Amino acid sequence: MRSTIALVSALILVGAGCSDEDSTDSPDLPNATNPPAPTAGEPPSPQATTAPPATDPPAVTSGQTATTPPAEPVLGPFEITTEDGLTLEASRFGTGSQFIILAHMRPADMSSWFAFAGLLAGEGYSAISFNFRGYGNSDGAGFAVDVDVAAAVDAAFALGATEVFVIGASMGGSGSVVAASRRNVAGVVTMSAPAEFLGADAVGAASAVTAPMLLISAADDAPYAADAERIRASAAGSAEVTILSGRRHGTDLFQQHSEDLTTLILDFLASA
């Protein structure tokens, strides 16, 4: 397992191509599908309730460059249908009966998880990475991150999953916590999840989440470290907060902490 982690770490770091000091991380910045967001380091506004119609997909994929293509899906693309009738594009990696749902941040898309999804497949899991509504070839516009994550969980069970974990970056983390309050999941991992994202109230939902949770953030990525503590304090089940050094956000945490972060997540999945 350690050699696999080291290989994926090297791929992610090559794709990142920058140090923490020269990073221009901006948590959940908008792409053409989303409403304006605050400047780098500020939380997304929970007061906003609408978004303009989707136009173009994200131009930048977190943690990757044009010269570093993502890993190819092991089993290839498929579609997920949401409870409000939208079709989301997704890719499945691996053939294991334990499924891991991977929910992206913005302005990234599902490909920001592909390298890690390939690693999970190598560890014997099935991983599903999907595009939220309005991203890539997914239908719709605006945000309903909890509804989209819940649809991915339902799709995993329809594919024969014996148990399902959800892992979400930033807005995907908020959506994962809320979805876990409504679905039977085996565990939840968040990376830089806002306490609330556009109607997805992770703090409120955590009081109904009995599955174990691992809440990860960077120390200098305000306010997300504090948000992780708020979610933990509200959790109905066991919840652990891990604060990493630096200010990377969401899946960009892999750029600075790839091996440690991967080990944290794999150990959580194995013990949950």
Image: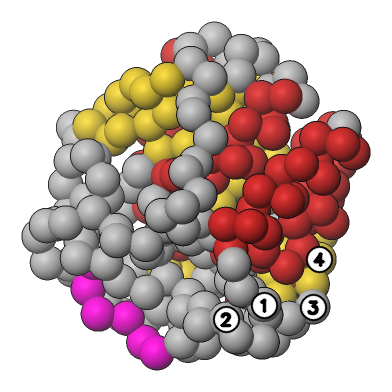
Please provide percent x and percent y for residue 135: 27, 50
Q: Is residue 65 left or right of residue 121?
A: left
**Of pointers 2 and 4, the one earlier in the residue sequence:** 2
**Of pointers 2 and 3, the one earlier in the residue sequence:** 2
Q: What colour scheme has been applied to the protein in the rendered image?
A: secondary structure
Graded by Cα atoms within 10 Å as few (under 14), some (14 to 19) or many (20 or more), the crowding at tag 4 reads: some
Tell me how far mark 1 sits from mark 2, CA to CA: 6 Å
Graded by Cα atoms within 10 Å as few (under 14), some (14 to 19) or many (20 or more), the crowding at tag 3 reads: few
Callout 1 secondary element: loop
Callout 2 secondary element: loop
Q: Quadrant of the N terminus?
A: top right
Which amino acid type is shown beneath numbered disc 4?
Answer: Thr
Q: In this view, does 107 lie to the left or right of 186?
A: left
Numbered disc in front, either 1 or 4: 1
Graded by Cα atoms within 10 Å as few (under 14), some (14 to 19) or many (20 or more), the crowding at tag 1 reads: few
Between residue 191 and residue 15, name the one nearer to us: 15
Q: Does the CB distance between marks 1 and 2 fall below 8 Å?
A: yes
- Residue 245's tag is 3
Q: Which residue in the structure is indicated by mark 1?
A: 19
Which amino acid type is shown beneath numbered disc 2?
Answer: Ser
Numbered disc in front, either 2 or 3: 2
**Of pointers 3 and 1, the one earlier in the residue sequence:** 1
Q: Which residue is drawn at 28% across and 35% down?
A: 88
Numbered disc in front, either 2 or 4: 2
Q: Which residue in the structure is indicated by mark 4?
A: 242
**Residue lying at the far front of the rendered structure:** 67
Q: Is residue 58 left or right of residue 200?
A: left
Rendering quarter of residue 82: top left
